[in-house]
Image (cartoon, helix red, strand yellow):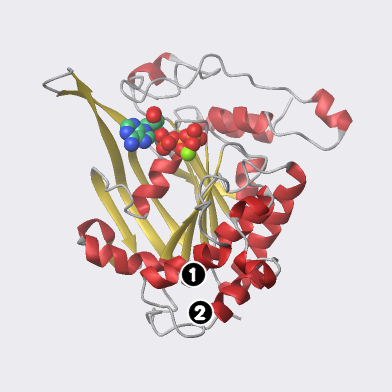
Amino acid sequence: MIETDINTPQTNPKQDTLITIQNLQVHFPVFQGLIIQKIVGAIKAVDGLTFEIKRGETLSLVGESGCGKSTTGRAILQLIRPTVGKVYFEDTDLTTLEPEEIRKIRRRMQIIFQDPYASLNPRMTVGKIIAEPLIVHNLATKKIRAHVEELLELVGLNPQFINRYPHEFSGGQRQRIGIARALAVNPDFIVCDEPIASLDVSIQAQVINLMQSLQKTLGLTYLFIAHDLSVVRHISKRIAVMYLGKIVELAERVDIYENPLHPYTQALLSAVPIPDPELEAKRERILLKDDIPSPINPPKGCRFNTRCPLVVDRCRLEEPEFREVNPGHFVACHLVEESQNRNSNPV
Ligand SMILES: Nc1ncnc2c1ncn2[C@@H]1O[C@H](COP(=O)(O)OP(=O)(O)OP(=O)(O)O)[C@@H](O)[C@H]1O
Ligand SMILES: [Mg+2]
């Protein structure tokens, strides 16, 4: 087992929320001009998110490419400083911290990236890659080699691989190295940014199983980022569906899969394969027209109105409020009641 080190702060066990996000916004400036550059607009990559991540849970963040998932993950970790909003880690507002204080608290918050090929330095041995965060955070001891071997074992790799280089491993094994590296500093919270997207389907399940068992053993909290609802089914406690910089629906996993209330969630869900071929043949696919609009100039009213199969005039004029329609089930849509009726009386 990994030793719990002395840097782990004492926290109030009653406090069940680890991360609190309030009105998080990340806007990237758009420049024009070759010599004198002027700011002419902003990419509203993340545009007002409010949600919590409970201690020990996996909250999945799902949505199409470009909707702002990675920016959200990075802004929570302060790898990108938010334009507006608050991010609390326990009671600490990370947005007010100086870089040195952030560096210290980052030991407790790690990230696993999508691409296990690009995220590992090809010139470093696996041992050095995993030990690096320990050295950065001044946690290296004389027993560092034993610690790294233990981490390799924990993620299902042979400790004798310690002197090998990343190119000597398969994609799934490299992702295990990325996980071991994130775990080295004994974090509480990990942003998993599409950690299985580049892996073969057969390997995806193994990595998900590993992450789940590590979560149980080490009491980890995950923000798990994915493109679609098929990969997050087994790992999520709750799911947030994101569209063009906003969360449109957030609920317990069972509510998202069995009672989706936003037309965008319904469209994403209709693309999830059903293992039963008979049911698969019968089910209705909701195909969304066009691509996701530009975050520089998002549509007025509801941002989904240009692609929504149920759109009415109100949706083009008035932005829907993100509200709790059932306990723990939040949706931003003017037509929630219609969706609720449709779900309870399917044709
Ligand atoms: N550093 C940056 N500078 C300018 N624009 C950026 C920057 N990073 C991201 N963006 C823009 O912000 C928007 C959201 O990007 P982000 O990477 O968060 O999306 P994503 O949901 O993670 O997409 P994907 O599923 O493809 O990884 C996109 O329009 C992207 O082009
Ligand atoms: Mg991304």
Residue 341 % position (x, y) = 61, 31
Q: Which residue is mark 1?
A: 131
274 displayed left or right of 228: right
Local packing at callout 1 (Cα closer than 10 Å; few below 14, some 14-19, many 20+) is many
230 displayed left or right of 13: right
Q: Which residue is mark 2?
A: 144
Q: Determine whether label 2 and label 1 are within 8 Å by CB.
A: yes
- Confirm or reject: label 2 Cβ below 8 Å from ligand 2: no
Identify which residue, 178 or 21, lies in the foreground.
178
Q: Residue at x 60, y 57 (%)?
A: 165
Question: Quick one: label 2 or label 1, which is nearer the N terminus?
Answer: 1
Q: Secondary structure at mark 2?
A: helix
Residue 242 % position (x, y) = 47, 37
Identify which amino acid the numbered label 2 is placed on. Answer: Ile
Q: Is residue 54 visible?
A: yes
Local packing at callout 2 (Cα closer than 10 Å; few below 14, some 14-19, many 20+) is some
Q: Is residue 234 visible?
A: no
